[in-house]
Amino acid sequence: MNNDLREQPEERLALQSPPPTLEAQTETPPQQQAGPAPRIRARGAARERTHTGGRAIVVTSGKGGVGKTTVTANLGAALADAGKRVVVVDADVGLRNLDVVMGLENRVRLHSLDVIEERCTLDEALVRDRIRRSLMLLPAAQNRDKDEIDPEDMLDLVDELQEKFDIVLIDCPAGIEQGFRNAVGGAQEAIVVTTPEVSAVRDADRVAGLLPGDMPARLIINRVRPRLVRKGTMMSVDDVLDILRLDLVGVVPDDREVIVATNRGNPVIDISGSPTGAAIRRIAARLLGEDVPIPDLTAHEPWFARMIGSLRPSRPSAKGS
Amino acid sequence: MKGNIFVVTSGKGGVGKTTTTANLGVALARMGKQVALVDADIGLRNLDLVLGLEKRIVYDVVDLAEGRCQPRQALIKDKRLPGLFLMPAAQTKDKESVTEAQMARVVHTLGADFDVVLIDCPAGIEHGFRNAVAGADQAVVVTMPEVSAIRDADRILGMLGSRRARIVVNRVRPEMVKSGDMLSIDDVAEILGREILGVVPDDEEVIDTTNRGQPVALDGSRHLAAIYSTMARRLLGENVPALEVQTDGLWMKLRRIMVGQR
C-alpha cells in the first residue's frame, strides 16, 4: 500500500484536484494505520482522478438493518429534488433490496455485473426512478456472488458514473467482507449509519476504523425514539457521539411510516409531515454544503405528552444535546 | 450426529438474529439444558454484548479453530444460569481467517458436549455465512414482516440445502398488521413455505434489555420470556402451539396515540 504511494509521488501532487466540499482530503496523505485487518485502499492512493466528476459517497454501517438502504433511497430522492443528477448503486450483490425499496423491482433487467463483464453498457443497466427523472438506480445481481467483483471493478464503474452524475450514492452490504470492500473501494466519502443501540454503535466504530484514513466519514443516527431517550432507556445523540467521534450530519427519528412506505416502494420524504422525511431532506441539504442546524429531537414534546409523562412514577429529565 | 446444532440466520441484518440467539439460549438453559451459543460474526461480534459478557472474553472461536486453546478455555460461563455458555467471536480478525471445515469441527466438538448448540450467523451470504452454516444440522431463519427481510430470508432458505429450517417472525407490530400496513404471519408463512417456529412482537423492552446485556427471557414473568420459552420447546420438537402475539388493549392504544409511541 505504501509502495503505491512512493512510486508516484509527483503524479499524485500534479493531479490532485480534491472535490470542493472535502476539506479532509486536501493535503494530508492517507494515514495507514497498522491493524490486524488491513484498511481498504484509499481511492486517492489507488488511482488519481483525472476528471472533475460528481461525488461518490458510500452509505455503510457494519451492522445490518440499521437503515442503509432506506437512507440511500430517500437521500437519493432528496438530492434529486435539490436539482442534482443522482445515481444510487446497489452494492449488495446476492441480497439486493434497493430496487424493492424504490419500487423498481419489476423494471430491473440488467445489473452492475452485466456492465462489469461487458454484456451491456452502463446506460442500458440504469433504471430511471418512477417519480424523479434525475434519479437512477444501478441494480445489483441477485444470483451472483460478491466475490465476483473486486474494488477495482467498482472503481471503474463508479468513475464512469461520476462523469454522468453529480452524486453517486453506493448502498453498502452489511458486514465487513468482500461486499463491503467493494462498496467502499468505489467511494471518496462515507456516510456511516447507526442506531442508538450498543451493538450498532460498536459495529459503526469498527467500520469507521476500516475506512481509508483520508476518507471523510459523516454520521447519521437513525431510528431515534425521542420518548425512549427521555426515559433514559435509549442512548442519546450525545452518548453516541461520545463513542464514535464522527462528524454528525443528521439525526433521524423512528417512524412507523417508514415501514409502510418502504413496503410499498415509496420514498418516506414524500409523506407530508413525516418527521423522518423532513430529517432526511435536511441531511441532503447539509451534504450539499448548506448550513442547516440539527434540531434536538428530544427537546420538544407536545403538552399532552408532557402531561402523561408527569403522571408516570419516575421520569428522568430529558437529555438535550 | 445428534442433530442438535442450529444456525440462527436471516440474510438481512438487523432483523434480530443475535437477540433471538441470546433469548432462545436463555430459554433453553432455563429448561435445564446445557447450551452453547457460538458467535460466528467474526470481526463484528455482538452476542457478547447482548449477553453482557463482553468483559470476560479471553480466547475466542478463532483461537479454538486454530488449536491455540481448548473449548473450555474459550467458553464463557454465564453465571446467571447454569448450563448457558458463550463461545465468543474474534473481533480483530477477518471472517476469512476461519475455514468452513474448521468451523464445522468446532461446532461438532461442542455438539458432543452440549444438549444444544446455537450459532449466531453474520448478516449476508458471504464467507461468514458459509462458515456459520457449515456445521449446522438445522436452521432458524429470523425475518420480519417487511418485503426486503422476507426476500432475503427466501434467498437464505435456498442456500440452506436440505437442512430443516423454521421461521421466527420478529418485530411484529400487531396494530400495523390489523390496519393492513404490515404483512401478517400467514402472509409470511405462505411466501416462505416453511413452518413458523414463533412470532415475536416489536417491543422497546427488547432494545433496552439488549443495551443492558440482560436478555429479556431471563425474567420469566414477562410475556416475551414466555414467547421465547415456547419457541425453545418447539425447537426441541415438543408439540406446543406457538404463542399468539397479544394485541394492545384500549388503554395501550390511547397511550400510544397520546405519547406518540411508534
Image (spheres, coloured by chain):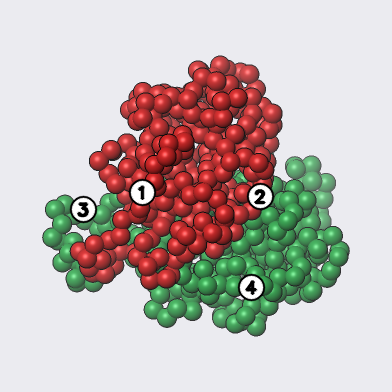
Q: Secondary structure at mark 2?
A: helix
According to the picture, the residue beneath numbered tag 2 turns out to be B158
Q: Which residue is mark 4?
A: A104
Residue at the front extreme, as displayed: B239
Label annotation for residue B243: 1
User: Which sits in the foreground, A274 or A320?
Assistant: A274
Dot 2 amino acid type? Gly
CA separation in Å, label 2 and label 3: 48 Å
Name the secondary structure under disc 1.
loop
Asked if one can make out residue A248 in the rendered structure from this viewpoint, the answer is no
Whether callout 1 and callout 2 share a subunit is answered yes
Q: Chain of mark 3?
A: A
Q: Residue at x 57, y 17 (%)?
A: B69
Amino acid, disc 3: Pro
Q: Nearer the viewer, residue B80 or A293?
A: B80
Q: Secondary structure at mark 4?
A: loop
**Horizontally, is A120 left or right of A190 in the view?**
right
- Pointer 3 residue: A316
Of the pair A300 and B11, the residue shown nearer to us: B11
Q: CA distance from mark 2 to mark 4?
A: 23 Å
